[in-house]
Image (spheres, rainbow, N blue to C red):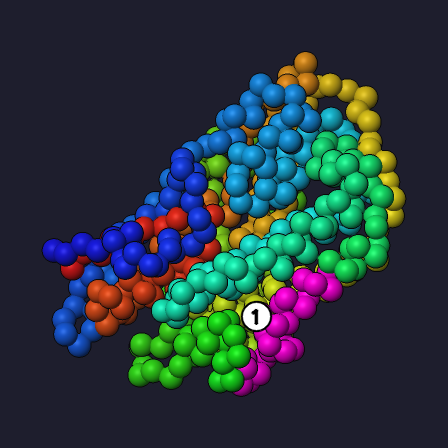
Amino acid sequence: MQSVNSQEMPPQEPPMSTVMLPGEGSVSVRLWLDGGPEGMAIRRAEVAARRPRAVAALVGRRADEAARLAPLLFSLCGSAQGLAVARACEAALGLDVGAHDAARSLLTDAEALDSHGWQAVVEWPVRLGAPPRPAALRELRSAVSAVLPALYPAKDGLRPGGGVLRPDFAALRSALDRMAGWLGATVFAGPPPRDADELAGWAARGGTDAALLAARLLSPAPAGWSLAGWGACGVPLLGERSPGWFATALAGDPAFATAPRRNGVPALTGPLERQVDHPLVVSVTERFGDGLARLFAARLADLAELPRRMEAAIAALRPADPVASGSSGPGEGCGVAETARGRLAHWLRLDGDGRLADARMVAPTDWNFAADGPLARGLAGAAVRDRDDAVERVRLLVAMLDPCVACGIDVHE
């Protein structure tokens, strides 16, 4: 029996997915291979996500303090984390903050664009055997960081009840132009592909790392070895967006936070869930079925749609003031927010003093990297040429599902 751990790969290669801060946790993948010189298969795959439940640090805090603390506890998707906690507090306190919806969607969409951008210039080049290019993120992150002060001059937009919303439309449109320009130059090198034929032509031109990765995924291969359809999992899409549904699930069963289910079975959340009806995703699915190409097409579609969604949100903006709370508790509520990786939900219960008596959350990693979730099911029985091929294919599938922590791989023959 031989074992390979992804952390023991060449030192120039960064962790498979996002940078992991100490104590944030990890995803581990263990594979058992069977076969011979002409090819192998993954006989068994074990996936385990280990994340410290940082949400416990919110218990005992007042609502506004919990919302401020959440982005600090979760280094990735901080705006979405803070917004989900703020919305949960607002639900518990009975606050209607609909006047802030467009501004808040701008904040989380900008954050999602930053997260997708990280993948495009750091993770995807590595999957091609090229060095990561984090310096290419500077312009994008400069534009993203301009959004919050252009909406909330006091940067108080994620507090329960909302902040003082005073949109600076010129600054917002300038930031959006810079983000769209970065996407056009760095990811697409022109208009985004709209169907499988345009995707193949775009890939063949190879103008960006994203296009080169598409070319690799679509490269012709003998039956059974194609990357395009590799990793098909058959797991249904999550589909649930209602805070009420998440509230019932999280409040009713503490174990739901670590082993979430929908209708008794695992589910997939993320770009594919959001973009399943996008023309590019529909066309790629018709040609290649489920698997890596479909997941990648969904990420491209998500990237292409973000500037359009942000433009619509800017057009819907109006100045608004904070909504004051007439109650300090008790009560309970759930808040839901979108991240690049999928849907995030926080549930909490306030005591009579307005402090969090209980808090629970379920994150995209909990869905997509569950023990029997999309990654595990996509790996089970999948064909591989050899051990090294297995490692690289798993890395590609993990990158497409994108955990919010680092991932290690062990392979046993």
Q: Quadrant of the C terminus?
A: bottom left
Position above or below: 123 against 193: above
Question: Which of the 4 quarters of the picture holds residue 20?
Answer: top left
Q: Nearer the viewer, residue 7 or 238?
A: 7
- Residue lying furthest left in this view? 1
Q: Position of residue 376 (x, y in %)?
A: 35, 54
Disc 1: which residue: 187
- The residue shown at (23%, 72%) is 385
Q: Main secondary structure of the magenta part?
A: helix
Element type where label 1 sits in the image: helix
Question: Which of the 4 quarters of the picture holds residue 80?
Answer: top right
- Residue lying furthest right in this view? 319
Q: Answer yes or no: is residue 119 visible.
A: no
Position above or below: 168 against 330: below
- The residue shown at (46%, 55%) is 402
Position above or below: 410 against 67: below
Q: Quadrant of the N terminus?
A: bottom left
Q: Position of residue 34 (x, y in %)?
A: 17, 64
Position above or below: 33 against 281: above
Q: Nearer the viewer, residue 250 or 126?
A: 126
Q: Nearer the viewer, residue 241 or 221?
A: 221
Q: Residues within 10 Å of mark 1 (few under 14, many from 20)?
A: many
| Amino acid type at mark 1 | Val
Q: Which residues are magenta?
A: 176-203
Residue 266 colored in magenta in the image: no
Q: Position of residue 17 (x, y in %)?
A: 42, 54
